[in-house]
Amino acid sequence: MSEGSSDARQQSHPASRRAQPAAPVLLNHRGLPGRPLFLVHPVGGTVTGYHDLAKRLSVPVYGFENQPRFGPKRPLSDLERTRESSVHAMAESYLPEVLKIQPQGPYALGGYSMGGVVAFELACQLRQAGHEVDCVITFDTPARIQPPTDTADEPSTSRIMTIAQVVGSRMREMTLVAEEVERVPAAERLAYLVAELRRQKAIPMHANPGILLEVMRTALNNEVLQRRYVPGMFDRTIFLLRALTPHPPLQAEAGASYDDPSFGWQAATTAPVEIVWVPGEHLTIMHEPHVEAVAAEVQRRLDRRGDGPGIESEG
């Protein structure tokens, strides 16, 4: 059996309440045969980045997200419930949703970037509960990144700029200048960046600024949780997809583990880490044209699973 992680008691946001996660989103067509693949959101909290992958796979793909769904009638007080206190707690809140869709294993889980860490923790918790896990896929995810030097409540300028780009839907077209952000009073920087995202049309102009602030705060909190997470020990194979093209920011975050082909995961499992290098770099592997190769590798891995119980009929 696998052992729990060490972040269960850590708090990243003192005011956080227990999250009430929404049901996972079906990312491809209903009625596909076979056991599903469960994917966990990256640091931005949404699963939109998985659509290009999901539509190329022959099994049902469900995505967990922890960002608010935009809607005019949802009060801002409800949005705080999307923020968890640790990766352990986040995975613990997703586990019942997995069991609702697929009551029996074996289970297939995965995630890109931060999502790979949460998927790993979710797999550990399934094993601790006596379930079988036959597939954990991490998409360019190091086992650990540098611990936080600030908090979600007092983020550095570089962190809020990074999160702003993650939240923006057209990040490659955005222009954010650190010196200009630094001139804004610290308490007003998130609001400034929301306005800048709207001005540059990286987010919808009609989007509620208050909700967008909560979206960015959730993403900032997610990043703190990933930085604090220390993986426990797992007892199944991890399938790691690594980007061939170096990504200096990720290299800095991963530290010495960046030069380890297993990205630090071999130290977290008693089974082998299966490593496959895919074209592209960290920010591009989940999108055209590189996602084609990623999807082919994922499908090959899923095809190696033995027959087992599928999802319950929705009919």
Image (tube, grey):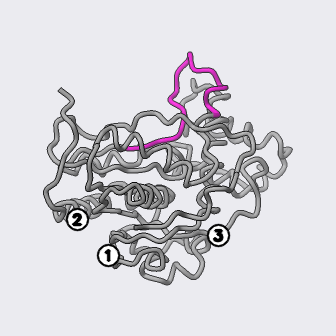
Q: Position of residue 174 (x, y in %)?
A: 58, 48
Q: Amino acid at mark 3?
A: Gln
Q: Position of residue 134 (x, y in %)?
A: 28, 63
Q: Position of residue 227 (x, y in %)?
A: 63, 62
Q: What is the CA distance from the residue labelled 1 to the residue labelled 3? A: 24 Å
136 over 265 or under it: above or below: above
On the question of residue 283 being in view, the answer is: no
Determine the secondary structure under disc 1.
strand
- Left-right relation of 108 to 256: left
Q: Residue at x 58, y 27 (%)?
A: 207
275 over 124 or under it: above or below: below
Q: Amino acid at mark 1?
A: Glu
- Quick check: marks 2 and 1 in contact, CB under 8 Å? yes
According to the image, label 3 marks what residue? 146
Quadrant occupied by the N terminus:
bottom left
Q: Residues within 10 Å of mark 3 (few under 14, many from 20)?
A: few
Q: Report the predominant secondary structure element of the magenta stretch.
A: loop
Q: Residue at x 80, y 39 (%)?
A: 188
Start-end of magenta stretch: 63-80
**Which label was assigned to residue 274?**
1
On the question of residue 124 being in view, the answer is: yes
Q: Residue at x 62, y 29 (%)?
A: 211
Q: What is the CA distance from the residue labelled 2 to the residue labelled 1? A: 10 Å
According to the image, label 2 marks what residue? 301
